[in-house]
Amino acid sequence: MMMSPVDIEAFQRDGAVCLRGVLTPDEVADLAASIDANLASPSPRAIVASRPDDPGFFIEDFCNWSAELPFSAGYRRIARGSSLPAAAAALMGASQVRLYHDHMLTKEPGTRQRTPWHQDQPYYNVDGFQNVSFWIPVDPVRRESTLEFVAGSHRGPWLMPRAFMSNEARWYPEGSLAELPDIEAQRERLQILGWALEPGDAVAFHMLSLHAASGVSAGARRRVFSLRYLGDDARHAPRRWKTSPEFPGLADRLPAGAPMDDPLFPVVWPRVIEDA
């Protein structure tokens, strides 16, 4: 996939851009089969993100590309062998791209649970500005059910991360970061970005971009695979708390401020010989 200069400019300016046809039909079919196998056998890291009284069901799973699970090979093919690593390099302006982690998110038909406004990077163990996440649906996504972004919010500041359902500050101590403003009360004066999507499309966004998503209608299903990549300036930032996702033992191998040079985060661009 050839990256358009317009797409790169939009990503750098707005912190989010829609990329059409980033995966081939065969890759979409491969990814959909992998997600279905993941749903049938979630890993120990999976979490249910909807309430018991929700008429639908929202489940997430993390960090499975390197596992020895029935669906892991399909995730690896997309994470390492698709056009996404090259697209990540172009969007970030990076000479080297590392895979950070994968994230499966599925909202079954009728799920009411919203994904509230938040930034991703405060939940992570990474500092640096060169990063990109791809949000890749394998089902059609209506505009009202898609991921939304506040344009330009990736320029900061970092905002307090909170647990989505309990609103607890489980990461940074209370008062240590600015609180999230009421985005819904300001929609008319903010530039809110969002796109209806077809299978094969992807939304690329910065880990500091403020984003949110609604539930899905009774007649819709929303299976999504998300991939996170890191660029040249990414550095390890060990936290005193459990990050989301967690990387057990990493702090023993990788000191604070070190490049993310660890087998957990392989270089995927430029291509290495074993990927050929």
Image (cartoon, rainbow, N blue to C red):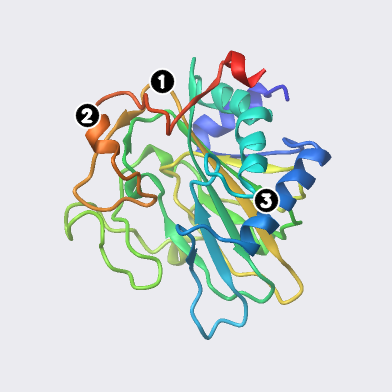
Amino acid at dot 1:
Asp
Task: Classify 10 Å Cα crowding around label 3: few (below 14), some (14-19), many (20 and above).
Answer: some
Residue 167, by quadrant, is bottom left
Residue found at the far front of this picture: 68
Residue found at the far right of this picture: 25
Q: CA distance from mark 2 to mark 3?
A: 40 Å
Residue at horizontal 77 percent and vertical 37 percent from the top = 21
* Residue marked by disc 3: 195
Residue 134, by quadrant, is top right
Q: Is residue 166 left or right of residue 15?
A: left
Residue 178's place in the image compared with 114, above or below, is above
Residue 128's place in the image compared with 33, above or below, is above
Task: Identify the element where label 3 is drawn.
Answer: loop
Amino acid at dot 3:
Trp
Residue 238's place in the image compared with 37, above or below, is above
Q: Quadrant of the N terminus?
A: top right
Q: Is residue 217 left or right of residue 152?
A: right
Q: Nearer the viewer, mark 3 or mark 1?
A: 1
Image coordinates of residue 247 in percent, x first then y, are 35, 44
* Residue marked by disc 1: 232
First in sequence, mark 3 or 1: give its number.
3
Residue at horizontal 60 percent and vertical 13 percent from the top = 273
Q: Quadrant of the C terminus?
A: top right
Residue at horizontal 61 percent and vertical 82 percent from the top = 55
**The disc label shown at residue 255, or none:** 2
First in sequence, mark 2 or 1: give its number.
1
Task: Identify the element where label 2 is drawn.
Answer: loop
Amino acid at dot 2:
Pro
Image coordinates of residue 140 in percent, x first then y, are 76, 56
